[in-house]
Amino acid sequence: MIIFSKERDSYWKMMQKYIGSDITSMVTLPVLIFEPMTMLQKMAELMEYSYLLDQADECEDPYMRLVYASSWAVSVYFAYQRTWKPFNPILGETYELVNHGGITFISEQVSHHPPMSAGHAENEHFTYDVTSKLKTKFLGNSVDVYPVGRTRVTLKRDGVVLDLVPPPTKVNNLIFGRTWVDSPGEMVMTNLTTGDKVVLYFQPCGWFGASRYEVDGYVYNADEEPKILMTGKWSESLSYQPCDSEGEPLPGTELKEAWHVAETPANDKFQYTYFAHKLNSFDTAPKKLLASDSRLRPDRWALEKGDLSKAGAEKSSLEEKQRAEKRDREAKGHNFKPKWFDMTDEVTTTPWGELEIYNFNGKYREHRNTVDTSDAIVLDDVQSIEFNPWQYGNLSEE
């Protein structure tokens, strides 16, 4: 992504006063830097290679289980190297995904200040639960992004619970030059049931791109003894090999591939994968799509069609409606309550700050079961549904 001439200069002047600050909820950004996707959809991109979690669930070797599960966690970074910004979800906005690997996925924007999202996915092999709160630090021509979130995967066969702590991300050349993304640091996935874990180190990008994309690390047992080495590039593939207590490959063994990036479209405007395009498609939407779904956002839809002027106007309109809903809600003395997730009393500590935890409440499962078993014929054109995530009234005339 490159911002040119007048747009670049005005954008730079606007952003200068925010250097050193967290800009997740402080700045209204121009639509020209966005991609036609929301953060809720971006959360769903982790499901592209969900077959790796299926393999982890089917695997009897506890260390290979972590090889497959951590490869799944790394796989999304190929998609995350896109430099366009996703839209911030409106409070109460949702995203639903079906027709992929037997998975049902639902995410919801559960807080506006601070911006927080919650997600849940499941199929016959696993459940996935995440509470996400991004923390950013604007540094002028770059921004550091800290994933203040909690990700848990439960493998259904044995009830194994895996906890994921990803590395931070740095977006470079945000204003001047060609923007690129790096994620230097450690990714740790821990088997909370057994104490085994995998630690993968994302190498920082050096001069002339040296070491960019490289990932190396080990699967450890509960006594922190290395059992399997892992190596590869998050832009290409990951491989594994059994090792001794010193981390050296065992004689007579060889590197085997655990994951390989799928083929991608050539010269795609937004650097989308085929799966990213599926996330915007109504082919992956369930019957009777919720009116709060990200696909229905008029600003996202206009940007996808290439109409930047309409996208900008619709984005401003949605933000004003969000402010109107907040005024209405506060005037009634009500607090916002998510529909599909419940805020718990649990507060967990992450490497970048404390996080309030939201749990999937099961109501979406009941809703979807009712809809899917209904004999009613659905005649509505899903694309004609008016986007409406708000809990209070019709705000179109506010």
Image (cartoon, rainbow, N blue to C red):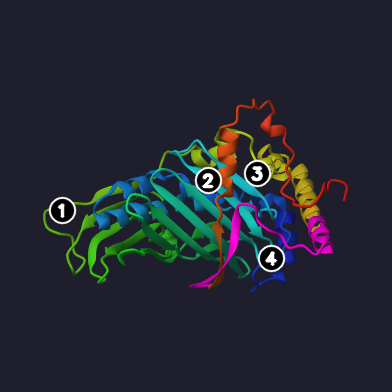
**Which residues make up the magenta segment?**
324-352
The residue depicted at 77 percent of the width and 46 percent of the height is 314
Real-space CA distance between mark 3 and mark 4, rounded to the nearest whole angstrom:
20 Å
Q: Tell me, yes or no, whether the two marked residues, 3 and 4, touch with CB atoms within 8 Å.
A: no
Real-space CA distance between mark 3 and mark 1, rounded to the nearest whole angstrom:
49 Å
Q: Secondary structure at mark 4?
A: loop
The residue depicted at 73 percent of the width and 63 percent of the height is 335
The residue depicted at 56 percent of the width and 34 percent of the height is 372
Query: Left of 352 or right of it: where is 375?
Result: right
Residue labelled with disc 1: 253
Q: Secondary structure at mark 2?
A: strand
Q: Secondary structure at mark 1?
A: loop
Q: Residue 124, how many percent across, how many down?
A: 40, 43
Residue 234 shows up from this direction: no
Residue labelled with disc 4: 113
Q: Is residue 22 magenta?
A: no
Q: Tell me, yes or no, whether the two marked residues, 3 and 2, touch with CB atoms within 8 Å.
A: no
Real-space CA distance between mark 3 and mark 2, rounded to the nearest whole angstrom:
12 Å
Residue labelled with disc 2: 105
Decide which of tag 1 and tag 2 comes sooner along the chain.
Answer: 2
Q: Amino acid at mark 2?
A: Phe
| Dot in front, 2 or 4 | 2
